[in-house]
Amino acid sequence: MKCPRCGHEMTMDEHRKYALHMCYECGYIEGRLNEGVTRKETNFTHLKNLTFNEATAFIAGGLGLEPEKVADWLDNEF
C-alpha cells in the first residue's frame, strides 16, 4: 500500500490491538481494520505459557533489571 501523503510504501504495524498502516518516511498513520490479521493469543496468555526462567528473563528485560534479582523476588513467599 502506498502512502497518500508522500507516496512511499507503508508497513503494517500488527503489535497493537488492531493493525495500522504506517509510513516511516512522513509519519502518516492509517487506522483501517484489516480483517485478515488477527492475534492468536494475548500478551497475558503468552506470559502465562512461559516457563519460570523465560518469564524471569522477559520481566527482567522489560524492567531493565538483572534476572537473578527478579527470580529471587518471585521466589519469596509472602
Image (spheres, grey):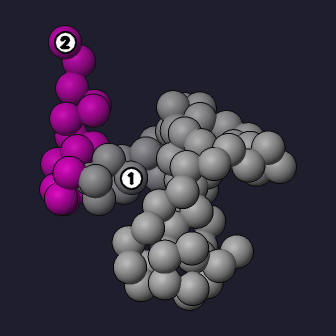
Identify the element where label 2 is drawn.
loop
Mark 2 neighbour density, 10 Å: few (under 14) some (14–19) many (20 or more): few
Task: Kindly report the secondary structure that dominates the magenta region of the rendered protein.
Answer: helix
Mark 1 or mark 2: whose residue is earlier in sequence:
1
- On-image quarter of the N terminus: bottom right
Q: Residue lying furthest front in this view? A: 5
Residue 45 lies, with reference to residue 61, above or below; the image says: above
- Which labelled disc corresponds to residue 58? 1
Magenta stretch contains residue 41: no
Q: Where does residue 20 sit, x and y in percent of width and height?
A: 56, 55
> In this picture, which residue range is highlighted in magenta?
63-78
CA–CA distance in space, label 1 to label 2: 23 Å
How many numbered marks does the figure carry? 2
Q: Which sits in the foreground, 7 or 22?
A: 7
Front-most of residues 53 and 15: 15
Q: Residue at x 55, y 39 (%)?
A: 17
Q: Which mark is residue 78?
A: 2
Q: Residue at x 49, y 76 (%)?
A: 5
Measured along the vertical axis of the image, is residue 8 above or below residue 22?
Answer: below
Asked if residue 51 can be seen in this view, the reply is no
